[in-house]
Image: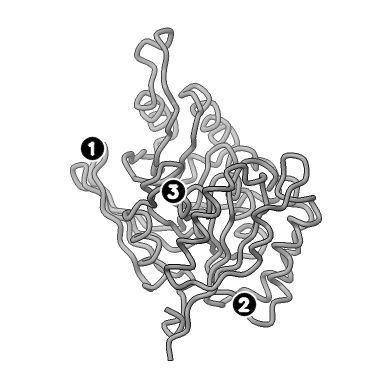
Amino acid sequence: MSVNPTIRLIAPSGYCINQQAAERGLDYLLTAGYRLENTGVVTRRYQRFAGTDEQRLADLNHLADCENLPDIVLAVRGGYGASRLLSQIDYSALGKRLAGQPVAICGHSDFTAIQLALLSRCGLITFSAPMLAGNFGASPPSEFTLQHFRNILRQKSYTIHWSGNKQKDFSVSGTLWGGNLAMISSLTGTPWMPQTDNGILVIEDVNEHPFRIERMLLQLWHAGILQRQQAVITGSFSGARPSEYDQDFSLDSVWQYLQELSGVPFIDGLSFGHEQQTVTLPIGATAELTSRAGQNSLTLSGYPVISSSRQ
């Protein structure tokens, strides 16, 4: 007999200032047939955070003690606060409890820090995915986003197609990793940064000027990380608006410069990030990327899938 999937909410970052959006998100998920747990985190607040460090940490570490694991663990929103928790997360216990389990840990933005730390310290694959307030609580939610979210969580292999800039034709495979660029660069030189060689790095950000984006990528290059990748896929960088002062300096020139510097192809145009229209990507999964005359495909496998009895 089919059982409705369970979503357990976590709030590891900022207080959800848009409570109306969060309520819309809860209503949408309930109407869609999901069972919701831990909804009290939506209104919880301490200073600018969604609770004290101890409360937000407990949201995560509780998963190690769950007798009945949820199908989906969903972050309420991003903001700031995840970085304060990294040294206190019980990676060993979470790794033991969640390894091989059909649990999809979902979020993006500030949550990238926790996702990469879980990948680095205990090999857990999580999903850079929609969040409660910003995506499920949109008015209305993007059907493109919802469709990609639903489909990838139910299929053992998933392929995304999109158009981007033209490169020399190539095909590579490796570990897909990344997420929010500001959070990736903030982990440089820390134990929370995955040591991924020959990987496929996917990046996105919001409200960052092109020169700041270039500076963060240069940090990855100076640290020897960027040049160890097989490809970089760029998602949305909304709010990255050059001024008259920049003249021809733009995101396109940033991608070209870093590609020439690192020797790693930059593939743009993926609908991924802080925009309403975004794909869901499994961070730490196996990926095959093919680019032919600006037409790109990314095939993903080896990530947690929701049990067919709970769909």
Give the residue at mark 3: 138
- Taking the view exactly as shown, the residue that stands out farthest to the bottom is 1
Q: In what quadrant of the picture does the N terminus appear?
A: bottom left
Secondary structure beneath disc 2? loop
* Residue 167 to residue 193: above or below: above
- Mark-to-mark CA distance, 3 and 2: 27 Å
Q: Nearer the viewer, mark 3 or mark 2?
A: 3
**Residue picked out by circle 1:** 166
Q: Which amino acid lies under the numbered mark 3 shown in the image of this protein?
A: Ala
Q: Which residue occupies the foreground of this view, 242 or 203?
A: 242
Q: Nearer the viewer, residue 197 or 155?
A: 155
Q: Taking 118 as reference, is 90 left or right?
A: right
| Image point (75%, 46%), residue name | 84
Identify the residue at horizontal 66%, vertical 54% (top origin): 11
Amino acid type, callout 1: Lys
Helix, strand or loop at label 1? It is loop
Residue drawn 38% across the image and 30% down it: 255
